[in-house]
Image (cartoon, rainbow, N blue to C red):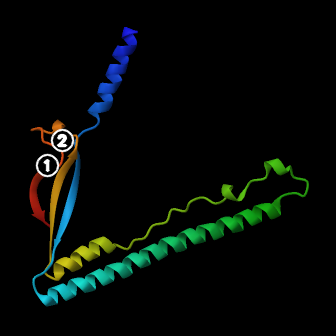
Amino acid sequence: MTRRSILLGCLLAAGLAGCGPRLETVENYVLPVSEAGKLCVAQCKQANTVCQSAKELALQTCRAQGVTRAQAEYQGYLTSLPKDVDKKKIKTFSDFNREPSCYSNLTCYSDYKDCYKSCGGRIEAQTYCVSNCKEMVPPMPDGSPVGPKTTL
């Protein structure tokens, strides 16, 4: 029993040792002061919305093409089966319908940030320790800011 307790204690200590402080960065967008700058930012937001829609459409199109490809492969498979095939050994559509690796190279967020700054807006970033902050040197309470506030 003692051996088991020691092993359990060691495993628990090793597990907790891997749980270091967790940091998160929060961005604060400061609008430009001029009306022209604010109008410019509104155009950036509109362009970002269009970009996000285009990105989502590209992903949906890719997924739909994956399903179409899977349907064609499955139909080809069914057509190639002999008439007396054992029904229990027939593959199902799900065997062909693999999740395609879809991605979009649109950089909406980065483009929006660049646009926002070009309009005279500022983006300030502050990193916070959100959990396990007592493990920092020096120890800090959860929610503490870490490092200086920076302007991106």
Q: Residue placed at 20% from the left, 78% from the top?
A: 116
The residue where tag 1 is placed is: 144
Q: Of callouts 2 and 1, which one flags the residue occurring earlier in the amino acid sequence?
A: 2
What is the quadrant of the N terminus in the image?
Answer: top left
**For residue 117, side relative to residue 52 (left or right):** left
Q: Amino acid at mark 2?
A: Cys
The image quadrant of residue 13 is top left
Q: Residue placed at 49% from the left, 66% from the top?
A: 102
Marks 2,1: beta carbons within 8 A: yes
Number of other residues with Cα within 10 Å of mark 2, as a class: few under 14, some 14 to 19, many 20 or more: many
| Element at label 1 | loop
Relative image position of residue 72 (x, y in whole percent): 70, 68
Q: Residue placed at 20% from the left, 60% from the top?
A: 26
Gap between marks 2 and 1, in whole Å? 8 Å
Relative image position of residue 113 (x, y in whole percent): 23, 74
Q: Amino acid at mark 1?
A: Ser
Up the image or down, 36 lies above or below 93; here it is below
Relative image position of residue 43 (x, y in whole percent): 26, 86
The residue where tag 2 is placed is: 133
| Element at label 2 | helix
The image quadrant of residue 92 is bottom right
The image quadrant of residue 74 is bottom right
**For residue 151, side relative to residue 100 (left or right):** left
Number of other residues with Cα within 10 Å of mark 1, as a class: few under 14, some 14 to 19, many 20 or more: some
Q: Residue furthest bottom?
A: 36
